[in-house]
Amino acid sequence: MLHYTKYIHETSKEWVTFVHGAGGSSTIWYKQVRDFKKHFNVLLLDLRGHGNSKPNLKDAFNDRYTFDSITEDIVEVIDFEKIEKSHFIGISLGTILIRNLAENYPDRVKSMVMGGAIMKLNFRSQVLMRLGVIFKSVVPYLWLYKFFAFIIMPNKNHRESRLLFVREAKKLYQKEFIRWFKLTSEINPLLRFFRGADIRIPTFYIMGGEDYLFLPTIQKVVKTHRESSLYVVENCGHVVNVEQPLIFNQKVIDYLYTAS
């Protein structure tokens, strides 16, 4: 089972589950924990092979990682904790996992908060992924990760986010990085399906105005998905919860109260 940390609120019955992105860990939410645990029960997860969660050895030796199998890891934790329904907050690749969980288990998701959401890989993103596929077995994964982090978070004010994710990525092994990277083979059809399917679960996108790779697609998605709304944080890049935590916390907590 995944490693996780929980904070129980004295009176609230509402749960908020945080899902980090690839190469990160639950520590990326360190600017959120204090504020959110004042209002809700909080569950922080380390995805398999990240943070304090060990890789699933059975999958590592016999099966490739899939979005469904990683989603099942999350469901296993909320089942174990007897959490019938939760709000889910994700960042970057974590938003894909949350949306996949909502497709497979819609009755378990009260609302979705998607920070730095990924709904489409544009041409530049797809070129990056193809380069990664070519070099993933010959180039040290940390070089690739630093390169990707710089492309996604290029500006000076994105530096804290870049350093945080690179620091967390150092805890991964090369083989584990490759297993996660192979997920890119199934990402395009999955995202195409997500864009076309209006899931009708309350969804709040909170995106940086400088998230050049992913913001344009989200602006289009919210126009066609009825239960979706978007807040753009100016002077902010991909990792909104780290770069602009005060705005992120205020806007998301306000949203969760309306969705409760």
Image (cartoon, rainbow, N blue to C red):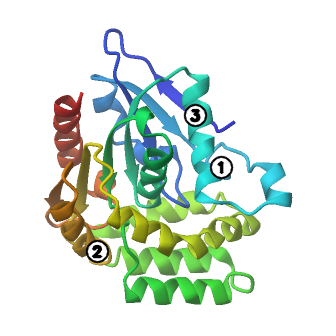
The label shown at residue 194 is none
Q: Residues within 10 Å of mark 1 (few under 14, many from 20)?
A: many
Local secondary structure at mark 2: helix
Give the Cα separation between the discs numbered 3 and 2: 32 Å
Give the Cα separation between the discs numbered 1 and 2: 31 Å
- Would residue 106 be visible to someone looking at this image? yes
Instruction: Indicate the quadrant containing the N terminus: top left, top right, bottom left or bottom right.
Output: top right
**Residue 172 x/y as whole percent:** 67, 60
Mark 3 and mark 2 in contact? Answer it, CB < 8 Å. Answer: no
**Is residue 243 found left or right of 72 in the rendered image?**
left
**Residue 86 x/y as whole percent:** 40, 31
Mark 1 lies on residue: 48
The label shown at residue 156 is 2
Q: Amino acid at mark 3?
A: Tyr
**Residue 160 x/y as whole percent:** 36, 62
Mark 3 lies on residue: 4
Q: Earlier in the sequence, mark 3 or mark 2?
A: 3
Where residue 76 sits, quadrant-wise, is: top right
| Residue 130 vertical position relative to residue 203 in the rendered view, above or below | below
Q: Earlier in the sequence, mark 3 or mark 1?
A: 3
| Residue 116 vertical position relative to residue 127 in the rendered view, above or below | above
Measuring 39% from the left and 62% from the top, which residue is drawn there? 194
Give the Cα separation between the discs numbered 3 and 1: 11 Å
Local secondary structure at mark 3: strand
Q: Amino acid at mark 1?
A: Arg
Instruction: Indicate the quadrant containing the C terminus: top left, top right, bottom left or bottom right.
Output: top left
Measuring 63% from the left and 36% from the top, which residue is drawn there? 3
| Residue 184 vertical position relative to residue 168 in the rendered view, above or below | below
Of 34 and 258, the residue lying toward us: 258
- Would residue 50 be visible to someone looking at this image? no
